[in-house]
Amino acid sequence: MYQATIHERVLRIRNGVRASDVLRVANRMHISKEFLVKALGFSRSAIDRKVKQRKHLSVDQAERVLGLVRLIGQVEAMVVQSGQADGFDPPRWTGQWLQQPTPALGGRCPAEFSDTILGQELLSALLARMQSGAYA
């Protein structure tokens, strides 16, 4: 998703994201479903119900899930560009990073900003600053 154009991302959102994809993303990130659901601002019972009924997420929910997947892709691209990708697990690193208080966010955890698209854009900008060495 990180390399996808805006048009491609919009089509992916409109085509639907399965509720079960929330579980897959949590597993890839080595974080609990409960943590991810809370970080994305979802109702746990609503997600559980949609998973059980094999339903898709709402457009708003799909945007947030794919926004997080895009952040994972950004981390992966950063590591590949650095030439240090061997053995690095971008989803796991992102899952850990989301839970760590960060000085650049006033001591708050990045997960606290992942429930909105604007918050995810803030996190993306922070990752870019980390890559450039301008991280504070």
Image: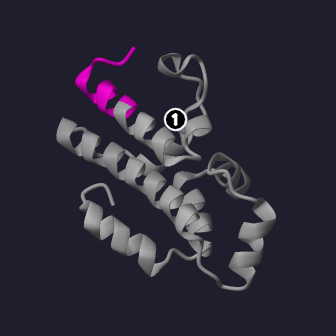
Q: Residue furthest right?
A: 45
x and y percent of residue 56 in the render?
A: 59, 78
Q: In the rendered image, which quarter is residue 10 located in?
A: bottom left
Picture quarter with the C terminus: top left
* Image: 16 above or below 40: below
Q: Position of residue 102 (x, y in %)?
A: 53, 22
Vertical arrangement, residue 103 with respect to residue 12, above or below:
above
Quick check: 29 left or right of 44? left
The percent coordinates of residue 23 (x first, y second) are 62, 66
Q: Which residue is mark 1?
A: 97
Mark 1, other Cα within 10 Å: few <14 / some 14–19 / many ≥20: some
The residue drawn where x is 59% and y is 47% is: 115
Question: Magenta region: which residues?
Answer: 126-136
**Secondary structure beneath disc 1?**
helix
Q: Is residue 134 above or below residue 31?
A: above
The residue at 81%/66% (across/down) is 45
Residue type at numbered disc 1: Trp
Q: Pick the quarter of the image with the N terminus.
A: bottom left
Residue beneath the point at 61% across and 24% down:
108
Give residue 123's position: percent from left, percent from top: 44, 36
Given residues 29 and 120, the one toward you in this image is 120
Which residue is located at x 77 percent, y 61 percent?
A: 44
